Image (tube, rainbow, N blue to C red):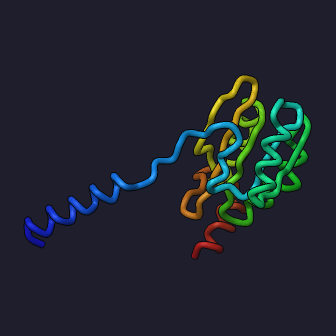
Amino acid sequence: MNRRNFVQDAALLAAAFAAWPVRPALAGVGPFDEAEIALVDRNLSDSAAFADAARVRGMSALEFTGDVAGLWMRELEPRLRGGPVAIAGYTSAATLFCLDFLARDFGARTVRRVDAGGAVTFVISQRLGRRAVLAPAAVRAQWSNSNA
């Protein structure tokens, strides 16, 4: 590679980044770009609008009232064990804290968050290459076997 090729490639790369669409911050009920599941706390105002927007986009909307523990055990944890998944949510900040903490054992984390009064809109995302170092041994073995 000579200097001329380097400068041309750098200019093309800069032009590509300049033309790259900038994602707006989460607004209202629209953090669905990458999510497959919507998690909604019915106790919060505007929760129905969030769930409806998710369904319109073809996502499964998992609704709960107050306590997300049962939904975590029946729906969310098995999906996280199954492989990469992204979850959009409209919950309280305390619920998001718990979900984020539990999801870290499966290599997932909160990648977007917007506080809106008493509610939080968020996306928790899991990727194949990212898993928690302190994940339970069974989970680490499962990831090792499925990613070998």
**Camera-side residue: 98 or 18?**
18
Task: State the image coordinates of residue 93 (x, y, percent, origin top left).
Answer: 72, 30
Q: Residue at x 77, y 36 (%)?
A: 91
Q: Residue at x 66, y 29 (%)?
A: 115
Q: Establish if 5 lies above or below 71.
A: below
State the image quarter where residue 98 is shown: top right
Task: State the image coordinates of residue 67 (x, y, percent, origin top left).
Answer: 88, 37
State the image quarter where residue 14 is shown: bottom left
**Camera-side residue: 119 or 143?**
119
- Residue extending farthest to the bottom is 148
Query: Is the C terminus in the top left, top right, bottom left or bottom right quadrant?
Result: bottom right
State the image quarter where residue 45 is shown: top right
Q: Residue at x 84, y 31 (%)?
A: 44
- Residue extending farthest to the top is 117
Q: Residue at x 76, y 39 (%)?
A: 90
**Camera-side residue: 67 or 140?**
67
Q: Is residue 81 left or right of residue 125?
A: right
Query: Is the N terminus in the top left, top right, bottom left or bottom right quadrant?
Result: bottom left
Count of marks, rendered view = 0
Q: Is residue 94 left or right of residue 143?
A: right
Task: State the image coordinates of residue 21 (x, y, percent, origin top left).
Answer: 45, 53
